[in-house]
Image: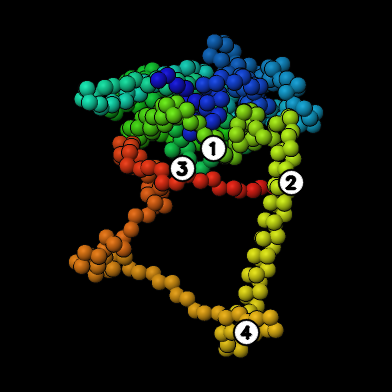
Amino acid sequence: MRISYSALDTFTICPAKYKFQNIDKIKVPKSKEAIFGTIIHSTLKMMHETSRLVPPTEEEVLEYFTKKWDPKIYDDPHEEATAFEEGIKILKEYYLENYPTKFNIVDLETFFEVPITETKTDKTSPSVDSIHLITGKIDRIDKLKEGFEVIDYKTSKRLPSQKEVDNNLQLSIYHLGVVNRWPSLGAPGAQPIKLSLYFLKHREKLSTIRTSEQLKETKENIIGIIKQIQEALKNENFEPRPNPLCAWCEYQKWCPMFSHKYKEKKTIDDKKITEVIKEYFEIKERSKRDSEKIAEFQEIINQYCNNNKIERVFSDIGYITRTSQERYKYNEEKLKKILKPLGKWEEVCQFNQTKLKKIIPELPEDIREKIKSVRSVEKEFKILTGKKSS
């Protein structure tokens, strides 16, 4: 399979979006956030262009950005003006801190390929190798005094933790892409490859490196995602996965999670469901208020019983009794020593699916596949959750 990093990332975030984008190939306009990022990236490429004998001045950089800017991508003039000012601010601050001649730039916006070998076993052959090609584009590669630095520009507002950067799949793939281009960099004792995400709005560059063990895990992770994609293709099942990015998704019209919102022709059933939803929220709100009131009354009754040293209170319409309940906690190791010689430990140490779900992501890919092979759907059900529009 030939697949881009962005497609892998899209599938892990939402399989439905992956389908709309890469299988159905539905053409949608770029979001204003994406266009803003593209213009900033293009301007930084112009600023660092290695073919220039003399680096551009700040004025030339800002002029380039202004010519690329398209006010029509914003419906609100105030939002457009704010975004333009933010772009100017980002570039001024970046230019001040990153004057072009300070760096030994090897390449800009360079494309790469990473071959990932998957070894399969079947009945006819002990091993069959499949080569998957992961493609992508790196914003910038610098030559340092020792080694190289890969830099990816980010225009997002959110600044991730260092732990997230240390485990970032994109940077791991970039490392593999650089090594594939210059194999000597992957040899034992080779100079380090520094991996950096430059968050332009925050003027922060977060850097990390990858160990050989991490790169091995990256390859296993990629193969795991590809297997999930192949399974989804086989079963024609690309379920939507609600996430914080849904609000900015360009495929809402086709998504089962949002398509009803865009339905143009209303039917009698649509009118009825609107009334049901309204009443649903009203009942939920009443239920919440009732639960809070009951908790308040329980506190008052408990306090009254404590003060009067009683366990039952009466009124004209009935009475309320309170009873003591105890919940115990056992020392598992000591309990095991008591029950195991009697052959009873396995009876109380029951399978815990919640704990299994928690440890699965930490297991090797082959173990995850084995666990998947012994599971079956016991029951399928839908859960309704409501959220009122603000």
- Amino acid type, mark 1: Arg
The alpha-carbon separation of the residues under discs 3 and 2 comes to 47 Å
Marked residue nearer the N-terminal end (4 or 3): 3
Q: Is residue 21 above or below residue 267?
A: above
Looking at the image, residue 333 lies above or below residue 222: below
Which-is-in-front pick, marks 3 and 1? 1
- Tell me what residue is drawn at x 66 percent, y 60 percent: 288
The residue depicted at 63 percent of the width and 82 percent of the height is 319
Residue bearing mark 4: 313
Residue 118: x percent and y percent?
32, 25
Amino acid of disc 3: Lys
Residue 209 x/y as whole percent: 41, 34
Residue toward you, 195 or 360: 360
Q: Earlier in the sequence, mark 3 or mark 2?
A: 3
Q: Which residue is mark 1?
A: 241
Q: Amino acid at mark 2?
A: Glu
Question: Would residue 244 be found to the left or right of residue 135 on screen?
Answer: right
Identify residue type, mark 4.
Val
* Pair 4/1: label in front: 4
Earlier in the chain: of badge 3 and badge 1, it is 3
Q: Earlier in the sequence, mark 2 or mark 4?
A: 2
Task: Give the residue pinned by disc 2.
Answer: 275
| Neighbour tally class for label 3: few under 14, some 14-19, many 20 plus, Cα within 10 Å | few
Determine contact: label 4, label 3, CB under 8 Å: no
Q: What secondary structure is marked by label 2?
A: helix
**In the image as oriented, which residue stretches furthest toward the left?**
341
Q: Report the residue that reaches farthest toward the front.
A: 268
Displayed quadrant of residue 202 = top right
Which residue is tagged 3?
163
